[in-house]
């Protein structure tokens, strides 16, 4: 309590109720998680009020859960509900569970057949296919829409799914969403068809039944910027501050190593092998690959670890600037950092996400004389078709293989 209160007596007034013996530990947990006094004090006051309310209701500490929190908030709303009370109680529950005071949250029993099937599909994607959480969420959203479209008037029966059901859903989807979203729907349906076949729900071949969406990706040039513009983006980070050192290290990892945003999020302090000069990258499909650590990237990471990364229990390499001190929740945070640096650099590139730096690295390698095979190795592509997009960047090589225009030179 002394970390948040000016005097020990001021904090002692809050130690009452069922959870009185745990409030000091909760205060220390908040402090270690990076909560400032402006946030920590209201959290502690809300926890103390909750503790006294539990005492009045005769509820033991082992019976504290989300339902008790909701009951307390309904009671508190009749008087005065403070902003942040629910966030404070969520943090309190998390602390009590980590400390072993209360049991972990039980998984609710789901009666909806559609939700059960959707959850099983999501678990299959994460465990068997090794997709990222973002991909799993996107695929599940598409399958949720498909199941609602197919079984809107009856119970969900996977064995009743037929090829024409997939066709009708894709055609219906194409009338309401963009082509890129329709392509995602087809990919999700094919993964879902494999899942149903593995479970034995269907015996026929559904995977190839989904309509093919035209791929216009190869009709355009890669969205990239010049090396000079990349340096302008890097220069926007104020490396005199902890936040600037973190953002500079993230941008340099994207620009020099060509990592995807999700791969940056997944990096841990143990993934950097300083002795070997390598970084372990947790890529798509549960693949772990070692790539060289350039000198400038290693120097930026070392500067961040020494004078930028806050003290915390998580092993994630890059930590949030605001409490709680944990790793980023998703790749969207990395793209936000890139977009912010682009805006400060006063650039207007064709895209503003983290992939812009990955594309720019590959394009620069080709323009310096590198081959498509080197680009594929650098970006860790599994299929040659993925790298084919960059073939149009090497204009000299294209001129050498292009046939002469009819009638020219005669």
Image: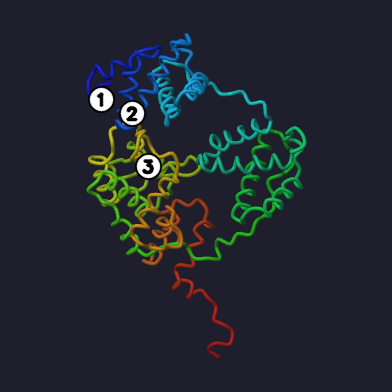
Q: Nearer the viewer, residue 338 or 189?
A: 338
Label 3 or label 2, whichever comes before in sequence order = 2
Q: Quadrant of the C terminus?
A: bottom right
Label 2 or label 1, whichever comes before in sequence order = 1
Q: Residues within 10 Å of mark 2 (few under 14, many from 20)?
A: many
Relative to 152, is 47 on the left or the right? left
Looking at this view, name the residue that lies furthest to the top. Answer: 58
Residue 136 placement: quadrant:
top right
Q: Read off the residue under disc 2.
A: 40
Distance from the alpha carbon under mark 3 to that under mark 1:
38 Å
Q: Read off the residue under disc 3.
A: 280
- Can you give x and y, in whole percent of width and height, for residue 79 in the image? 46, 23
Q: Secondary structure at mark 1?
A: loop
Q: Secondary structure at mark 3?
A: strand
The dot on residue 260 is: none
Relative to 374, is 405 on the left or the right? right
Q: Nearer the viewer, residue 194 or 158?
A: 158
Q: Quadrant of the N terminus?
A: top left
Label 3 or label 1, whichever comes before in sequence order = 1
Residue 326 placement: quadrant:
top left
- Can you give x and y, in whole percent of width and height, for residue 177 in the image? 63, 53
Q: Residues within 10 Å of mark 1 (few under 14, many from 20)?
A: some
Determine contact: label 2, label 1, CB under 8 Å: yes
Distance from the alpha carbon under mark 2 to that under mark 1:
10 Å
Above or below for 383 versus 162: below
Q: Residues within 10 Å of mark 3 (few under 14, many from 20)?
A: some
Q: Read off the residue under disc 1.
A: 3
Residue that appears at 43% across and 20% down: 97
Does residue 271 appear in the picture of this structure? no
Residue that appears at 64% across and 41% down: 143
Residue that appears at 48% across and 23% down: 73
């Amino acid at each position: 309590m002394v970390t948040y209160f000016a005097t020990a007596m001021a904090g002692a007034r809050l130690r009452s109720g069922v959870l009185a013996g745990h409030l000091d530990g909760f205060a220390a947990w908040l402090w270690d998680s990076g909560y400032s006094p402006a946030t920590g004090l209201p959290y502690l006051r809300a926890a103390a009020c909750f503790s006294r309310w539990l005492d009045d209701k005769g509820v033991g500490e082992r019976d504290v859960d989300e339902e008790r929190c909701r009951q307390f908030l309904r009671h508190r709303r009749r008087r005065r509900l403070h902003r942040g009370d629910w966030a404070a109680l969520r943090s309190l529950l998390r602390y009590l569970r980590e400390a072993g005071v209360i049991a972990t949250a039980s998984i609710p029993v789901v009666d909806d057949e559609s939700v059960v099937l959707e959850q099983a599909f999501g678990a299959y994607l994460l465990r068997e296919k090794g997709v990222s959480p973002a991909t799993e969420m996107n695929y599940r959203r598409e399958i949720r829409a498909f199941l609602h479209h197919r079984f809107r008037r009856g119970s969900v029966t996977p064995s009743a799914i037929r090829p024409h059901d997939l066709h009708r859903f894709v055609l219906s989807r194409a009338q309401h969403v963009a082509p890129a979203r329709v392509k995602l729907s087809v990919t999700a349906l094919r993964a879902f068809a494999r899942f149903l076949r593995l479970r034995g729900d269907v015996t026929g071949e559904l995977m190839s039944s989904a309509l093919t969406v035209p791929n216009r990706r190869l009709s355009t040039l890669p969205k990239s910027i010049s090396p000079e513009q990349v340096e302008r983006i890097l220069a926007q980070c104020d490396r005199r501050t902890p936040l600037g050192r973190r953002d500079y290290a993230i941008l340099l990892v994207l620009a020099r190593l060509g990592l995807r945003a999700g791969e940056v999020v997944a990096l841990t302090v143990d993934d950097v092998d300083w002795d070997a000069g390598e970084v372990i990258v947790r890529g798509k499909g549960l693949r772990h690959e070692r790539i060289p650590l350039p000198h400038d990237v290693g120097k930026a990471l070392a500067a961040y670890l020494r004078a930028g990364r806050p003290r915390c229990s998580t092993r994630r390499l890059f930590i949030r600037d605001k409490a709680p001190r944990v790793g980023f929740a998703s790749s969207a945070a990395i793209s936000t950092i890139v977009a912010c640096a682009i805006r400060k650099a006063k650039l207007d590139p064709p895209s503003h996400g983290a992939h812009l730096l990955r594309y720019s690295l590959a394009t620069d390698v080709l323009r310096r004389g590198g081959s498509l095979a080197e680009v594929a190795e650098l970006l860790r592509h599994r299929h040659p078709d993925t790298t084919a997009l960059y073939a149009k960047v090497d204009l000299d090589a294209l001129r050498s293989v292009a046939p002469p225009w009819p009638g020219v030179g005669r």
